[in-house]
């Protein structure tokens, strides 16, 4: 077994091969994986800010709760640093429930202040670098052009279809209220003012008082939501961030992209969409009974109300600059004709603006645009009919009007203004559309089959009930149905209120949405738990019944108003993803549907459930392999692949730095468009501060450009890649064996429930979707991936982010592959990113803290699981250090390590308090199924969950 060597076949390796391997060697940006600062300068500034805010928090606690409460907080913090926790447990045991609430609030508020200050200094650090991400990527592209490795025409073609789409989901992992987040943003702005070297001497007292005021307000504010959020609340949260991005981030970002591309000799079309946004709030029905068709329409109304208000704001700002007069400039006949048509359609507006702006054609046109936008907003709010020329039916009409203005400027030779504010408005509006984001709909495959069972069984055509058909029989039936055009639902045959009525009701709702808001409002219908092609055929048949799809014929093109995407969630589904896509695209009727969608087939890859199913090593590797297979199949069928990565915030659910993840994909899988979920606490961490949001979006966009342009084919010889693949097969296979050995142990679920606050998660009111799947028996399979990760994270075991990796790496090392692993870490983006994410999770894992949970909360007959966890943790740390060549975790990032150690000093009291509150809660409810712990115990416990999530900067 130990015969393999990284140098096996090395004699056959050429100098060129070694140069290629070395050329792709990069040191991982460790700070990116932790989201912290890495320079001494910013670390010192961060420490100073934290000291100031901590002092202000202490003063607020003293004002509101008394000096004795602050003294208790400090005593708890000191005792939590002692290796023996006996004195701490005794002190906490003496406190009444109300005091426990105050302690939890104090440490939670501390971390909220630390987090936003760290975000501020992280932004200051990255903006202090000599070149931004887009500049670096443009430099690499220029080098490829200079070497002759890249064709300029191909470059322009690929850049024209680049599209990075973050999709804001409603997944329940943001534990901090939006009210608190807004206060924290103001704290960051005030700290930035205080650190501004341009400030006047007299400003210090003002900013100090403002900081004290904000910190006091945070202490006065309830951290916990009093009610579970509704899908509309989740939509408002997403829209809050999207509006901030539209106002403060997009104009500068798209202009920066254009400048960098112009330097490469490429002009981006004005209507290109290099950045756009998606959302699941109001569309993710899978497992969420509160997302109804009515809710979907309500959410779309909210989106368009905000989107149109934002567009009106942008136009009003633009009007202040569109002052050119016909005494100086000339306009095109097209613009002149458009103004005449506007004056006829909107005579009252014309009579108002003619007197003041008759010689200012651009201002005239944009005044009409503003009125049409306002009328569009009114029409949608009232539900009245579209009036051509007086409002906008869809975004294309708005884009046409804005383009008329720009084209006129350029035709008159005015490139400065033609490529200035009007172009920024066009690019920003193109990114957001009329409704800020495109909605995706997701539903479980089983729902569609239940609906079709009712419809087919009503026809009496089947000798066997639909529900009793095996998979192949169902595929044959549905394929034939797709090839035809007959309606399954006859006129005058009411559906009742069963599964068919529910599914068709959703389809008719989507048709209403498209008719009301335009073609961009809903783009993709995602089918979760897609096991075979019948799961896609089923939803297309239902969409046909509602008039969303006409599959056409061999002589007639299809019509498809929405696209359809399978979601591959488990390792078993990922293993057959390529063959399934091949069979799907081989069906003539379905292939015509894809052609009607521009020959683009979207595929969603699920990180959460595959990791929960087989462990992180097997999950990550199988997703990587699936992408290769899907890429090859799509090419054979002449289809462009749009991959949608369903990543969570934590490493155990596919989290980690977005840019690194994009560059870690197999070569050739990214050819312009990509979608990636942004979930929960990740959204606030990335976008709470607009300046940091700009950097995060730029880094991801730069990675999409680089991957699409420079990574179109294999970077290394086949023999090297085969060797790496075989090594990764061994790592993933052995890791999966170790992981499944743990999760299939009957003692694991009792251990997990006892050692973590997973059962308390449902009381946190952080999401509308239930934390468990309905109708289950209460086992591991019934638990969703988010609470699975959330629970392990709270008790600092963080098992989903590393368990099994040590066994996998050890198996490869014992097979003589250590040098190969080290080579892979240095020169393979996928493996480097994978191991860097694992290292960060290991750094946050603290099994000494976890041991306190086990000693206090886990029955003695279930503690053996912890021994298995400890052994694998020790093995994983040891093997990761071997591969990375370090003596300790984060050895190469000492500043970052100090930052994380500082957090631990304040996390320890929260963990101790959480253990104490869990013990009290369970003691109060023992033996009574419906019993509840005292209100203050529940409140203190939920506050510790909030605080630990803030301290670790991860929930699920």
Image (cartoon, helix red, strand yellow):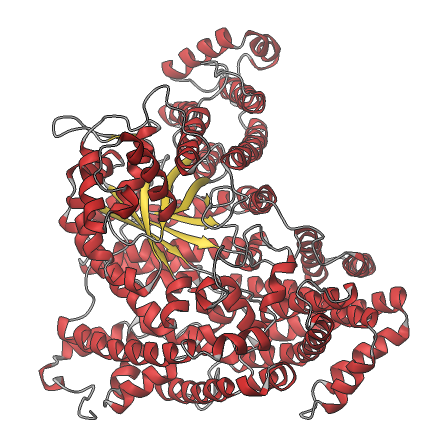
* Residue in the image at 42% along x and 14% along y: 338
Q: Is residue 649 above or below residue 450?
A: below
Residue toward you, 382 or 432:
382
What x and y, as percent, mark residue 698?
44, 54
Is residue 494 in view from this perspective?
yes
What x and y, as percent, mark residue 775?
48, 56
What x and y, as percent, mark residue 634?
19, 50
What x and y, as percent, mark residue 789?
50, 68
Which quadrant would residue 717 be assigned to in this image? bottom left
* Residue in the image at 56% along x and 82% along y: 846
Q: Is residue 182 above or below residue 60?
A: above
* Residue in the image at 49% along x and 65% along y: 129
Horizontal relation, residue 821 to residue 726: left or right: right
- Indicate the quadrant containing the N terminus: top left, top right, bottom left or bottom right: bottom left
Horizontal relation, residue 45 to residue 624: left or right: right
Residue toward you, 519 or 244:
519
Q: Is residue 597 above or below residue 910?
A: above
Residue toward you, 534 or 497:
497
Which quadrant would residue 487 be assigned to in this image? top left
- Marker count (numbered): 0
Is residue 656 in view from this perspective?
no
């Amino acid at each position: 077994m130990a015969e393999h060597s990284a140098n096996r076949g090395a004699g056959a390796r050429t100098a060129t091969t070694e140069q290629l391997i070395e050329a792709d060697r990069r040191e991982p940006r460790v700070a990116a994986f932790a989201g912290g600062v890495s320079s001494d300068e910013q670390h010192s500034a961060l420490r100073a800010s934290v000291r100031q805010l901590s002092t202000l928090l202490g003063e607020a606690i003293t004002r509101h709760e008394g000096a004795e409460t602050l003294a208790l907080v400090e005593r708890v913090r000191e005792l939590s640093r002692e290796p023996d926790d006996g004195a701490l447990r005794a002190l906490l045991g003496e406190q009444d429930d109300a005091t426990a609430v105050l302690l939890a609030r104090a440490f939670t508020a501390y971390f909220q202040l630390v987090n936003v200050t760290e975000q501020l200094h992280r932004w200051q650090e990255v903006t202090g670098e000599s070149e931004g991400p887009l500049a670096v990527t443009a430099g690499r592209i220029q080098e490829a052009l200079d070497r002759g490795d890249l064709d300029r025409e191909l470059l322009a073609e690929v850049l024209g279809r680049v599209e990075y789409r973050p999709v804001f989901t409603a997944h329940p992992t943001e534990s901090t209220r939006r009210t608190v987040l807004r206060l924290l943003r103001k704290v960051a702005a005030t700290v930035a003012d205080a650190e501004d070297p341009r400030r006047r001497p007299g400003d210090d007292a003002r900013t100090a008082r403002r900081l004290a005021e904000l910190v006091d307000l945070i202490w006065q504010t309830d951290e916990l939501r009093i009610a579970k959020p509704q899908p509309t609340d989740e939509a408002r949260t997403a829209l809050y961030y999207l509006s901030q991005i539209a106002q403060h981030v997009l104009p500068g970002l798209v202009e920066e992209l254009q400048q960098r591309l112009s330097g490469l000799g490429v002009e981006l079309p004005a209507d290109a969409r290099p950045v756009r946004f998606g959302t699941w709030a109001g569309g993710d029905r899978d497992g969420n009974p509160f997302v109804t068709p009515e809710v979907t329409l309500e959410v779309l109304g909210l989106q368009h109300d905000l989107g149109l208000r934002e567009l009106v704001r942008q136009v009003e700002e633009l009007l202040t600059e569109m002052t050119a007069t016909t005494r100086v400039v000339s306009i095109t006949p097209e613009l002149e004709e458009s103004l005449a048509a506007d004056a006829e359609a909107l005579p009252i507006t014309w009579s108002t603006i003619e007197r003041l702006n008759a010689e200012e054609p651009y201002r005239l046109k944009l005044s009409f645009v503003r009125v049409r936008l306002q009328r569009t907003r009114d029409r949608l709010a009232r539900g009245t009919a579209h009036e051509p020329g007086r409002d906008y039916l869809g975004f294309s009409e708005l884009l046409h009007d804005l383009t008329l203005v720009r084209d006129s400027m350029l035709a008159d030779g005015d490139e400065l203004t033609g490529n200035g504010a009007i172009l920024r408005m066009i690019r920003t509006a193109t990114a957001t559309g009329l409704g800020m984001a495109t909605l995706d709909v997701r539903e479980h495959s089983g729902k569609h089959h239940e609906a079709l069972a009712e419809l087919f069984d009503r026809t009496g055509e089947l000798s066997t009930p639909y529900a009793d058909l095996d998979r192949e029989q169902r595929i044959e039936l549905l394929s034939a149905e797709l090839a035809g055009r007959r309606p399954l639902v006859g006129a005058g045959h009411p559906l009742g209120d069963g599964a068919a009525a529910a599914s068709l009701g959703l389809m008719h709702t989507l048709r209403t949405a498209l008719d009301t808001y335009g073609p961009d409002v809903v783009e993709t219908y995602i089918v979760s738990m897609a096991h075979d092609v019948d799961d896609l055929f089923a939803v297309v048949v239902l969409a046909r019944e509602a008039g969303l799809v006409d599959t056409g014929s061999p002589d007639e093109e299809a019509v498809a108003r929405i696209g359809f995407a399978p979601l591959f969630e488990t390792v078993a589904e990922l293993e057959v993803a390529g063959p399934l896509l091949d069979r799907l695209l081989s069906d003539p009727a379905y292939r015509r549907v894809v052609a009607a969608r521009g020959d683009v087939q979207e595929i969603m890859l699920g990180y959460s459930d595959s990791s929960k199913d087989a462990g992180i090593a097997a999950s990550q590797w199988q997703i990587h392999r699936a992408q290769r297979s899907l890429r090859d199949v799509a090419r054979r069928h002449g289809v462009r692949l749009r991959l949608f990565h369903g990543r969570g915030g934590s490493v155990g659910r596919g989290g980690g730095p977005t840019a690194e993840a994009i560059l870690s994909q197999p070569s050739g899988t990214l050819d312009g468009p990509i979608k990636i979920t942004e979930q929960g606490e990740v959204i606030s961490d990335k976008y709470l501060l607009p300046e940091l949001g700009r950097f995060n979006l730029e880094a991801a966009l730069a990675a999409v450009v680089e991957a699409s342009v420079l990574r179109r084919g294999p970077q290394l010889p086949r023999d090297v890649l085969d060797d790496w693949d075989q090594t990764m097969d061994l790592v993933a296979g052995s890791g999966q064996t170790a992981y499944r050995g743990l999760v299939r142990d009957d003692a694991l679920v009792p251990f997990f429930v006892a050692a973590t606050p997973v059962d308390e998660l449902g009381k946190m009111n952080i999401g509308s979707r239930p934390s468990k799947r309905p109708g289950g028996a209460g086992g591991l399979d019934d638990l969703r991936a988010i609470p699975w990760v959330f629970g392990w994270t709270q008790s600092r075991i963080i098992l989903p982010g590393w368990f099994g990796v040590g066994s996998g790496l050890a198996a490869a090392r014992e097979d003589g592959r250590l040098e190969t692993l080290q080579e892979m870490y240095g020169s393979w983006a996928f493996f480097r990113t994978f191991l860097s994410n694992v290292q960060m999770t290991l750094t946050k894992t603290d099994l000494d803290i976890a041991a306190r949970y086990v000693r206090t909360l886990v029955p003695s007959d279930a503690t053996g699981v912890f021994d298995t966890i400890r052994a694998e943790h020790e093995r994983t740390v040891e093997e990761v250090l071997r591969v990375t060549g370090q003596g300790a975790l984060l050895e190469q990032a000492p500043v970052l390590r100090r930052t994380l150690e500082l957090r631990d000093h304040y996390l320890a009291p929260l963990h101790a308090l959480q253990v104490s509150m869990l013990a009290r809660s369970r003691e109060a409810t023992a033996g009574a199924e419906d019993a509840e712990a005292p209100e203050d115990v529940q409140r203190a416990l939920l506050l510790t969950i909030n605080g630990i999530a803030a301290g670790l900067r991860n929930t699920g």
